[in-house]
Amino acid sequence: MARRRSRRFSRPLVPGFWTLLAAALIIAGTLGWMWLGGKLLVVKPEALGKVLK
């Protein structure tokens, strides 16, 4: 009778895939927050004119 091969010992198709995916998500999230913060912190000229009046 042939022995079944355990999935635990099978090699992944791409070595380090989950590590690379996690790193990419962290970098994308950080850049996304920086972009969003930059958009929210820009003072528009119309808003500045209303405050100075």
Image (tube, rainbow, N blue to C red):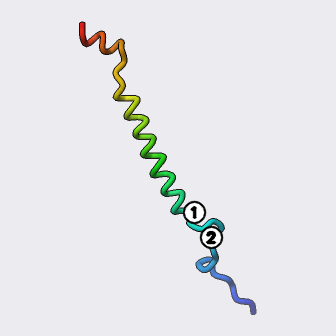
Query: Dot 1 surroundings within 10 Å: few (below 14), some, or many (20 or more)?
Result: few
* Residue type marked 1: Phe
User: Residue reaching furthest top?
Assistant: 53
Expressed as whole percent of the image width and height from the top left, the position of residue 14 reads 63, 65
Q: Which residue is mark 2?
A: 12
Residue 6, label in figure: none
Quadrant the C terminus occupies: top left
Expressed as whole percent of the image width and height from the top left, the position of residue 46 reads 35, 12
| Position of 28 relative to 41 (above/below) | below
Q: Is residue 34 above or below residue 10?
A: above
Q: With 25 as the anchor, is 46 left or right in this view?
A: left
Q: Which residue is mark 1?
A: 17
Vertically, is 47 above or below 10?
A: above
Confirm or deny contact between disc 1 and disc 2 (CB under 8 A).
Answer: yes
> Which quadrant of the figure has residue 47?
top left
Q: Residue at x 40, y 29 (%)?
A: 39
Q: Quadrant of the N terminus?
A: bottom right
Tag count = 2
Q: Secondary structure at mark 2?
A: loop
Circle 2 packing at 10 Å, graded few (<14), some (14-19), many (20+), is few
Residue 26 falls left or right of residue 21: left
- For the point 46% across and 49% down, the residue is 27
Residue furthest bottom in the image? 1
Residue 3 relative to residue 45: left or right: right
Tell me the distance, in whole angstroms, between the alpha carbons under discs 1 and 2. Answer: 8 Å
Upstream in the sequence, badge 1 or badge 2? 2
Q: Amino acid at mark 2?
A: Pro
Residue 44 placement, left or right of 18: left
Residue at 60% across / 68% down in the picture? 15
